[in-house]
Amino acid sequence: MAGDRLEGLDLTEHYGLTDASLSSIRQYSVNLRSLSLAKLKHLTETGLEALFTFVENMTAPPMLRHVDLADCDHQAVTDQVLRLITEGATKRPVVGQGALQQQPHQPHPISTTQLGGLTHLNIQGASLITDTAMESIAATCACFLQEMNVSFCTRISDQGLGYLVDPCAAQLTRIHVYGNAQLTEEFVDGNRRATDPTFEITGVWMKKSSDRTQR
């Protein structure tokens, strides 16, 4: 079926879609690498968790490289959803060697294999996202992430963004932070790549003692 070869799916502004639509995405997600669900206000945290949770004997969740969840319902995109997305993008459960020694009635031990990670992430307007999500992204995608939009994610702190940026390799070139008035010079001028011309923070506005108040 054509769905088996589907690599990109853009459902932006298909306003009538609900959690019920996500099961079809899961069914044909084997090769899916890019997914946009931006501005879908009827999706819920429960539906997104179901899409991205590994369940034995079910089609594995998509291994995404590009994810756009901008301007969904403000309660739908959470730290837990981001953790599941990043883990699904980077790892796959595999049966461990010890399974050969297990008794038939015992569950197989589960390990994981590293396969890649998110390169582009847009969670603009996800007001429930906190520093915990930044830690999840840093732990799984630091060697892959190229661009991220966390505009209007007002619970993310200087420390959280710094925790993300510091371990990221040089492929991370841009972070969008519009609407995040809680951010200060501590992050903007204090992150590890603050003087790197290949790294850009867009949307910064704050009162500062220096003359560099806007980017």
Image (cartoon, rainbow, N blue to C red):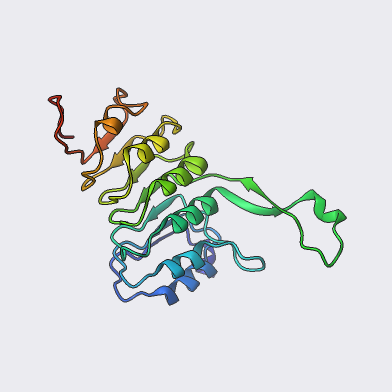
13 vs 31, left or right, is left
Q: Position of residue 166 (x, y in %)?
A: 41, 31
Q: Position of residue 28 (x, y in %)?
A: 52, 67
Q: Position of residue 138 (x, y in %)?
A: 46, 40
In percent of the image, x 48 and y 55: which residue is there?
Answer: 85
Instruction: Say how many tags the image has.
Output: 0
Instruction: Please state which of residues 61 and 45 is positioned toward the viewer in this rendering.
Output: 45
In percent of the image, x 45 and y 49: which residue is there?
Answer: 65
205 vs 75, left or right, is left
In percent of the image, x 47 and y 57: which residue is there?
Answer: 80
Q: Residue 1's quadrant in the figure?
A: bottom right
Q: Position of residue 22 (x, y in %)?
A: 45, 71
Q: Residue furthest top?
A: 195
In percent of the image, x 27 and y 32: which residue is there?
Answer: 188
Instruction: Please state which of residues 213 and 72 is positioned toward the viewer in this rendering.
Output: 213
Instruction: Please state which of residues 162 and 140 is positioned toward the viewer in this rendering.
Output: 162
76 vs 57, left or right, is left
* Image position of 23 with respect to 132: above or below: below
* Image position of 212 with respect to 49: above or below: above
Instruction: Please state which of residues 173 and 96 is positioned toward the viewer in this rendering.
Output: 96
On the rendered image, what quadrant is the C terminus found in? top left
Q: Residue 191's quadrant in the figure?
A: top left
